[in-house]
Image: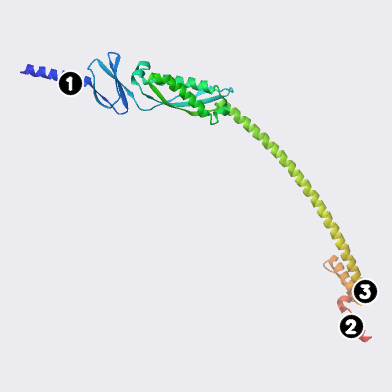
Amino acid sequence: MRKGLVVLLVVAAAALVVALSSLYTVNEGENALVVRLGAPVGVVETPGLKVKAPFIDSVIFNDARLLLLETPSEQVILGDQKRIVAQVYTRFRIVDPLRFYQSLHSVGEARAQLAQSVSTAMRREFGQINLPTLLSPRRQEVIQAVHAEVGGKFRPLGVEVTEVRLHRADLPLETSQAIYDRMKSERQREAKELRAQGFEWAQLIQSRADRDRTVILSQAQRAAQIARGEGEAEASRLLADAQKGDPTFFTFYRSLQSYRQALAESAPVLLLTPDAEFLKALKFGPPDTRGRTDAK
């Protein structure tokens, strides 16, 4: 009885091992290649639980989704002998697991060969254009040429290259520094020219302003001298008329002018005798010509 139970357990364990070795699962977004004793026998692309021959069949799973390949940045020489640092990224997927296994065997090998092919095609295409073309809308045509070359090479290997894009394209550091230094020196030269031109304009404006100032001042002085002469002539005429019309008032007016000049130029204290002729006008005021006329 005990021996039969042991035999039953051994048979059950063997059956479980056989069942486990004959079943496998294909997940969503995967495809599987069944290999029997080293030779491919079938491709499974639908997800789910699958059956294979135990012990002699092995299953190789491949990712059926889009895969990304980012190659390192590398220096590329353009057709005009300019150097740039370019980086390209590529998207691809495995569309034929059987051909992929027969030609490339693994995703790692596929990435290595794809990176080499993209680099070679990029160098070939970029070597035929100059830097202005790369910076123009024609750059897309160049990238499309790289895409077509790489895609046509890997399609027979079971790999579909869906996209090739230029991630970045920069000048090398030493070239960028040289261009920056040249631009800096050019801007400094332009600044010096503008400063010299501005200084010249300032001198012209200053000389024109000085000339206009001299002309305006001379005209103003001439007009002032004319006005002053006319005023003095008019004053002399009025004084002469006043002297003719009323000599006594004229004499009094001249006395007041003498007071103004004498007192303005004298010291704080002016000593005079009470009966000085100089004080006559201050003591008695203006002469009463009307009364004198009446007395006559």
Q: Nearer the viewer, mark 1 or mark 2?
A: 1
Q: Is residue 276 visible?
A: no
- Disc with the residue nearer the chain's start (3 vs 2): 3
Amino acid type, callout 1: Leu
Amino acid type indicated by mark 2? Arg
Q: Count residues near mark 2 (Cα–Cα under 10 Å), then give few for <14, some for 14-19, many for 20+.
A: few
List the residue tagged with mark 1.
Answer: 16
Disc 1 to disc 2, C-alpha distance: 160 Å
Residue 177 seen in the current view: yes
Picture coordinates of residue 11 (x, y %)?
13, 18
Q: Percent position (x, y) of residue 137?
A: 53, 31
What is the crowding at mark 1: few (fewer than 14 residues within 10 Å), some, or many (at least 20)?
Answer: few
Please, what secondary structure does the residue beneath circle 2 have? helix
Label 3 – label 2 distance at C-alpha:
16 Å
281 horizontally vs 123: left or right: right
Residue type at mark 3: give it. Gln
Q: Which residue is mark 2?
A: 290
Residue at the image point whose x is 60% and y is 27% from the top: 178
Q: Secondary structure beneath disc 1? A: helix
Residue denoted by label 3:
243
